[in-house]
Amino acid sequence: GAGVSQTPSNKVTEKGKYVELRCDPISGHTALYWYRQSLGQGPEFLIYFQGTGAADDSGLPNDRFFAVRPEGSVSTLKIQRTERGDSAVYLCASSSSGGPNTGELFFGEGSRLTVL
Amino acid sequence: GENVEQHPSTLSVQEGDSAVIKCTYSDSASNYFPWYKQELGKRPQLIIDIRSNVGEKKDQRIAVTLNKTAKHFSLHITETQPEDSAVYFCAAINQAGTALIFGKGTTLSVSS
């Protein structure tokens, strides 16, 4: 595709529910990142994929958060038992190179998650 | 882990003035420092970056300086225009080299 695509753009859910957020990176980009951005804050790193594997998942806040990238392209961020504190914009970014210091990160428009 | 501090949090200037945003980082091994611009409701986009082997880089009205000894780097925008109004984020690479760690952002307002 022309850019990083994220769906849904908006998701409203109730506390305790399960949600999935999808990221479709730029075609051919091997590196994929998930970030979380709360109002008035900078993007907070969650997880980095190189190909199909999670090279660094140290930013995932707890075991309710999980992400997959089974074929090395599309990625899904999964959040179980959502809490109100999970409300944020979830940003996905991709890069053509290995590691964030080897190429520009191209961000998607984000998925705004609201937990009521 | 890497910690990036950014200031000021807000900056208001008149059109044509210069704007300077400063960041400090904690990990002396960091070697890559990009700046991203995020307009309201839009995605962050890279505007300039600098690597640790240089002290300054310029691209038209935008420049970035790096002081590795002091572990700080700055964004300089000259001849500001209303379209420069946005939130600017600095970032540095974490120790593992696997992630960009972002500052909290500076909201720049340029009034005409």
Image (cartoon, rainbow, N blue to C red):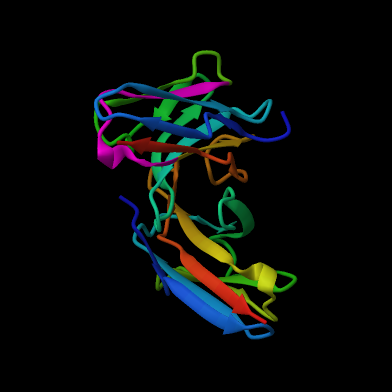
Horizontal side, residue B104 vs residue A4: left or right: left
The reply to whether residue B66 is visible in this rendering is: no
Q: Nearer the viewer, residue B43 or B32?
A: B43
Is residue A105 within the magenta segment? Answer: no
Above or below, A35 relative to B68: above
> Where is residue B82 shown, x and y percent of the image?
67, 73
Give the residue displayed 53% in from the left and 43% down from the top: A100
Q: Nearer the viewer, residue B107 or B73?
A: B107
> Where is residue A45 shown, x and y percent of the image?
40, 42
Horizontal side, residue A59 vs residue A8: left or right: left
Is residue A82 within the magenta segment? Answer: yes
Q: Which residues are magenta?
A: A74-89
From the image, which quarter does the C terminus of chain B lie in? bottom right
Total marks in image: 0
Give the residue displayed 59% in from the left and 58% down from the top: B39
Q: Nearer the viewer, residue A103 or A112?
A: A112
The reply to whether residue B101 is visible in this rendering is: yes
Give the residue displayed 54% in from the left and 46% down from the top: A101
- Among all residues in the image, which is located at the extreme top? A71
Above or below, B10 relative to B37: below
> Where is residue A79 shown, x and y percent of the image?
33, 26
Q: Nearer the viewer, residue B28 or A112?
A: A112
Q: Quadrant of residue A16?
A: top left
Above or below, B11 relative to B43: below
> Where is residue B10 shown, x and y percent of the image?
45, 73
